[in-house]
Amino acid sequence: MKTTRRAVLGAGVGLMGLTLAGCGLSGGGGSAEQEKAAKEAKEGKVEGEISFQTWSLKNEKFTPYFEDLVARFEKENPGVKVKWMDQPGEGYEDKLLGQANSGALPDVVNVPPNFAYSLAKNGMLLDLAKADEKLKDVYVEGGVKAYEMPGIDGSYGYPWYLGTDMSWWNIDALSKFGVSEDSLPTNFDELYDLAMEAAKQGGSAPIISSLPEIIITSGDDGKFNFNTDENVDFLQKYVELYKAKAMPVEVLSDNYTGNAQLYKQEKVLWTTATSSYPTELKTDNPGLIDKTVVTKRMGEPPLFVQGIAVSAKSKAPAAALAFAKFATNTENQIEFVKLAQGFLPGTKEAAADPSKFAEKSDIELQNKAVELAAESMKTAVDPTNVMWTEDMKTNMGQQMALAMRGDITAKEALDAAVKYGNDQLS
């Protein structure tokens, strides 16, 4: 199975992972077992040997941080020894699967929500909602909700480092259509109208250059049901944009590099990207920085989440829980994201004040983006449906491309994508 992540940390891997669902993980954990595990973690003695696993973070930048983190925890808890281990970016999904199946899942482990879903479903992760009554008071709401899994009671990860993105506009080029920073689109309908008007006038790069982002929903029965009239109408707008040449043809090609790359090449006039995007502009096209303005994402800001979970099978549950809380407390999260610039910490207190963790940049555009990212954290939501696999995503992209080319209707595309997803679940 192929592993992907959303943004960049360490050795070039980032935030969002694929699900382990359907990959052969067996086992289970009932409510009684979770209650027992939570009680032992809350009330047990903080002692013993535990393992802590990160994902592609052992390098010159982060190794000193983790070595210091472990040393400080052990000093505060002399009865505990922590073994830090790190796994490479590629193959992490399969590595976790193998560890879980062999009973060797680390006591404290770095997992994104997609990975946590299958592990939690099979009773491998500690329910932190039961083990830590302060969970929702301390951590960013959207991050906590990202680890609340469909069909499973509880919450299964501490939000650790988070990301969101925002809109970046080539205001210099857009001004030719009478657009100012104060009159930029604030919803998709306004963006659609502007993109169609720009295409009609010609002589300019397109504005929109990404496939529609349709939220993958499922019903109480667990079946996907996002082929709604509203989403059909939304996809139809993209069909019209593509037909009107209001989108670049590269969007539907196999080697499409993404809207952020096209924006840097000044082939499109709008993109979405994280708060660190100006550093890329400075490297790849510094002349574009002064032409660019940044605003919040239209609609609900997305939340990209990495977290730390605790094994429900740990032989030193109190020590494992204590270390997970220590690694993700406000002080340590702030220190971590000082190294991981562009990300935000997962506690409410830390995320509220960017001045504590974000270096002041000599690029004012980036300073503004960091402030917007911190503000977005208050309402950002992880849009990922943990049951939606990469294979399903690929099929859906193919169906949407067929619709945009005019080979099938928008409704046929979404109906086919829903059917394929539900067939795969079966």
Image (cartoon, rainbow, N blue to C red):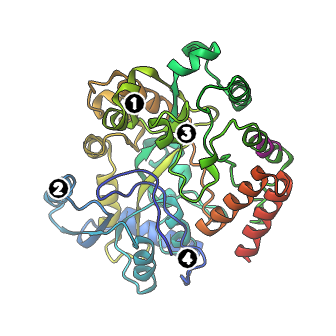
Which residue is labeled 1 in the image?
A: 370
Q: Are marks 1 and 3 in contact (CB under 8 Å)?
A: no
Residue at the spot 54% in from the left edge and 53% down from the top edge: 256
**In the rendered image, which quarter is residue 201 located in?**
top right
Mark 2–mark 3 Cα distance, whole angstroms, equals 31 Å
Dot 1 surroundings within 10 Å: few (below 14), some, or many (20 or more)?
many
As rendered, which of 17 and 102 lies closer to the eye?
17
Q: Is residue 273 left or right of residue 197?
A: left
Could you tell me which residue is drawn at 44 percent across and 43 percent down? 163
**What residue is pinned by disc 3?**
380
Asked whether 295 falls inside the magenta stretch, the response is no
- For badge 3, the amino acid type reads Ala
The amino acid type found where label 1 is placed reads Val
- Camera-side residue of 95 and 353: 95
Q: Nearer the viewer, mark 1 or mark 3?
A: 1
Which of the numbered marks, if any, corresponds to residue 344?
none
Estimate the x, y position of residue 266 in percent, counting from the top left. 49, 33
Mark 1 vs mark 4, foreground winner is 1
Q: Which residue is mark 2?
A: 60
Badge 2 marks a residue whose secondary structure is loop
Q: Secondary structure at mark 1?
A: helix
Sequence-first tag of 2 and 1:
2
Counting the numbered discs, the total is: 4
Q: Residue at x 62, y 42 (%)?
A: 248
Residue located 64% across and 33% down the image: 299
